[in-house]
Amino acid sequence: QFNIIKYEDLKWDISLGQGSFTRIFKGYKTDIHKGEKQVTEVLLKELDVAHKNSWESFFEAASLMSQISHKHLLLVYGISVHGVKNIMVQEFVKYGALDLYLKRGRSVSVSWKLDVAKQLASALSFLEEKNIFHGNICAKNLLLAREGDPLQGSSPFIKLSDPGISVAMLGEDVILDRIPWVAPEVLEDPDNPTLECDKWSFGATVWEIFNNGNAPLRGWDLKLKRQFYEAFQQLPPSQWTELAELISQCMSYQPAFRPSCRSIIRQLNSLITSDYVILHATEPVTQ
Ligand SMILES: Nc1cnc(-c2cc(N)nc3[nH]ccc23)cn1
């Protein structure tokens, strides 16, 4: 499914923190290309030894991402196994996770945010075409490859990261903690996720982007999060009615009511041309 990278061809640099069940590092991989030594900057994702038994799922996520290639999907170079260590080698994306980037108070324009939403929608549409379920769409898994400069009008560029360990392998508490990104039906039946589930997550991610990286239901405990679904609640709507409409369509409790990717892209295009964008060119960052 994907190439095995020799451990000795990898070099670890600084630690960049940890995800759920993983530790991530900046690193380098060395290849011999036409007799030339070539060093590439990479992201090394080590699976925690404690979760060793879910390494298949960890690598399954990687192989899914390496079987297909799309400009807005993260490139996975391969995997490396060294003793008890399972390592996924990914392309290094310069500006890291979008949620942290937005939280750091970068004031970005409404059209910047719509651009990112559209890029995510095109990645989603590509996955839908290939009938591939992602399962972990959220701003934390959107990596910023290019900041885009409002003055020069160059737009941002994002890459959707790998889904990590599949939702079917996660404990119920981990799934509950992913409310409101995880679709309600996944809680009922985590073993049979559908493409519609990714559309729900898309809605929650767009909500996050327009709330400057602040997580929805931040700080809610698992009981409250579960009640959010049991009471069929919705996230607080944006003042921008058309945007709120798109988010609530994606986050409809009836999977069949969620819009097709084509419809999502069409609605985003009409948002991009709406006068709201011009009026709110650079919204003051409300922290
Ligand atoms: N595939 C990936 C994933 N994360 C990064 C990354 C980049 C950065 N500048 N700071 C970071 N801090 C944490 C992660 C990260 C890069 N590439």
Image (spheres, rainbow, N blue to C red):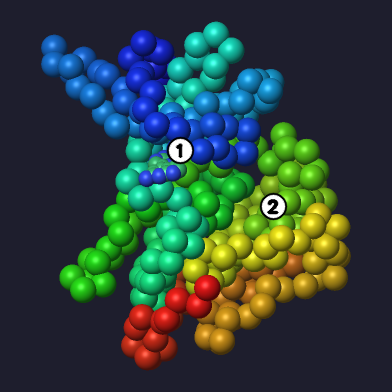
**Residue at numbered disc 2:** 178
Label 1, secondary structure: give it. strand
Q: Amino acid at mark 1?
A: Leu
> Can residue 187 be spotted in the picture?
yes
Please report the residue visible at 85 percent of the width from the left and 70 percent of the height from the top.
Answer: 231
Residue 106 location, x and y as percent?
Answer: 39, 66
Please report the residue visible at 49 percent of the width from the left and 69 percent of the height from the top.
Answer: 212
**Residue at numbered disc 1:** 16
- Left or right: 214, with 24 as reference point: right
Number of residues whose C-alpha sits closer than 10 Å to that of mark 1, classed few (under 14), some (14–19) or many (20 or more): some
Query: Quarter of the image holding residue 269?
Result: bottom left
Residue pushed farthest left? 35
The answer to whether residue 228 is above or below residue 94 is: below
Residue 168 location, x and y as percent?
Answer: 72, 38
Label 2, secondary structure: give it. loop
The answer to whether residue 232 is above or below residue 178 is: below
Res. 55 mark: none
The answer to whether residue 253 is above or below residue 69 is: below
Q: Amino acid at mark 2?
A: Arg
- Left or right: 205, with 156 as reference point: right
